[in-house]
């Protein structure tokens, strides 16, 4: 294998698995389950969770297996956005703007929020190797307005991007993150007084937006030595009379029903749908599991994320969208598959377009 290919695979291992430097244990009491050492977080008990293959088997496959159709041949459509367009959006409504992968810009009753923003060229600790974007963001970092709140689901490189955080650190009023992720942000120059850490089920309010962290079934880490030293989470946002759910990264687990029972009444659910594989069956959801989790949540609109930007698995880039759209049509589920840069106004009627159908 050529050196560049080897380095690319190594960066993929570090980036896609999340496997910064090792950090000391944070022994603060928490309701989130820990392993016996009191340092590493773990998922809720789930007797149906299937084990992943061992690390050697997974990474050997990344080095040797041939991928087909995982990167689009045709350009991914992007709707460029301007500040004038953003500022013209109704300040009395709640809007969701797809930036790519799991990154979203929200305009919640006139104030701007970000979810898992990644503006870098690659989802990797290095910007010359690792998974490369299929498309540019619909606007640049410089075009972003002042950000009221920034929410992170966990610390993997395709969700927590150092260059993006460093560029925005003086323009974000407050950061909302799972336990332990605050230390990551401080390493990137974010002032500690701007960071609020959450355990699962903890709730806070910022302005007129209520924020709640909820469980997810995943893992964390940014090197080979710090796995599960920080928590991962899904999130619930309430703005005005509307409620938004964001799954973050998660395998399917009974927690979705629990979230629906405790926090439900969701107008929209941004649900992970991509980077799944039989080698790691319990940390990402197949489209069938995404639909099942959505039904558990009892939400009104299924909005699928975690696809169409990075090559992080072995399925084709179209597979998540093809399968989830077929399932939603079969079951009569309201589906949103917005183009990159498209604005969705929560609660407003829209026509969903299967934009990828004629692309290779």
Image: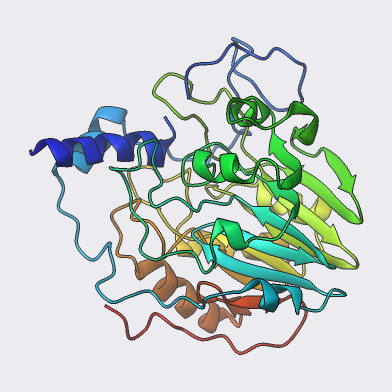
Left or right, residue 137 beside residue 315? right
How many marks the image carries: the answer is 0
Coordinates of residue 284 in the picture (x, y in percent): 47, 49
Residue at 39% x, 66% y: name it. Answer: 135
Left or right, residue 174 beside residue 343? right
240 to 322, vertically: above or below: above
Q: How is the image coloured?
A: rainbow
> Nearest the camera: 242 or 141?
141
Q: Residue furthest left?
A: 1
Residue at 44% x, 34% y: name it. Answer: 18
Q: Split into 4 quadrants, where in the image is the C terminus?
A: bottom left
Residue at 80% x, 29% y: name it. Answer: 193
Left or right, residue 328 beside residue 131? right
Coordinates of residue 217 in the picture (x, y in percent): 57, 41
Q: Residue furthest front?
A: 142
Coordinates of residue 141 in the picture (x, y in percent): 57, 56
Left or right, residue 43 beside residue 91? left
341 to 284, vertically: above or below: below
Residue at 16% x, 47% y: name it. Answer: 65
Coordinates of residue 112 in the picture (x, y in percent): 75, 60
Q: In which quarter of the view is residue 3 placed?
A: top left
53 to 94, vertically: above or below: above
229 to 312, vertically: above or below: above
> Nearest the camera: 76 or 226?
76
Q: Split into 4 quadrants, where in the image is the N terminus?
A: top left
> Nearest the camera: 248 or 209?
209
């Amino acid at each position: 294998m050529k050196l560049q290919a080897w380095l690319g695979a190594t960066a993929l291992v570090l980036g896609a698995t999340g496997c910064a430097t090792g950090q000391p244990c944070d022994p603060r009491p928490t309701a989130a389950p820990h392993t016996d050492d009191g340092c590493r977080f773990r998922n809720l008990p789930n007797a149906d969770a299937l084990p992943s293959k061992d690390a050697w088997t997974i990474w050997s496959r990344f080095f040797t297996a041939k991928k087909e159709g995982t990167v689009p041949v045709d350009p991914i459509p992007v709707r460029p956005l301007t500040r004038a367009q953003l500022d013209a959006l109704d300040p009395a409504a709640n809007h969701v703007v797809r930036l790519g992968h799991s990154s979203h810009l929200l305009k919640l009753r006139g104030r701007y929020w970000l979810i898992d923003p990644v503006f870098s060229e690659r989802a990797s600790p290095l910007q010359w190797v690792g998974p490369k974007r299929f498309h540019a963001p619909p606007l640049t970092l410089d075009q972003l307005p002042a950000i009221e709140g920034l929410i992170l689901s966990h610390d993997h490189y395709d969700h927590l991007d150092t260059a993006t955080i460093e560029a925005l650190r003086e323009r974000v009023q407050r950061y909302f993150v799972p336990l332990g992720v605050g230390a990551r942000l401080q390493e990137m120059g974010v002032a500690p007084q701007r960071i609020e850490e959450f355990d699962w089920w903890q709730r806070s309010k910022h302005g007129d937006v209520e924020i709640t962290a909820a469980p997810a079934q995943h893992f964390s880490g940014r090197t080979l030595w710090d796995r599960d030293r920080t928590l991962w989470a899904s999130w619930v946002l309430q703005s005005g009379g509307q409620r938004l759910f964001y799954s973050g990264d998660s395998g399917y687990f009974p927690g979705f029903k629990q979230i629906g029972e405790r926090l439900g009444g969701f107008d929209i659910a941004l649900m992970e749908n991509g980077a799944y594989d039989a080698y790691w069956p319990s940390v990402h959801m197949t489209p069938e599991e995404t639909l099942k989790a959505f039904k558990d949540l009892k939400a009104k609109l299924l909005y699928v994320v975690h696809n169409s930007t990075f090559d992080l698995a072995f399925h084709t880039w179209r597979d998540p969208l093809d399968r989830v759209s077929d399932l939603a049509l079969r079951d009569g589920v309201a589906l949103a598959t917005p183009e990159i840069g498209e604005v969705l106004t929560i609660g407003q009627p829209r026509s969903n377009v299967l934009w990828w159908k004629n692309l290779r």
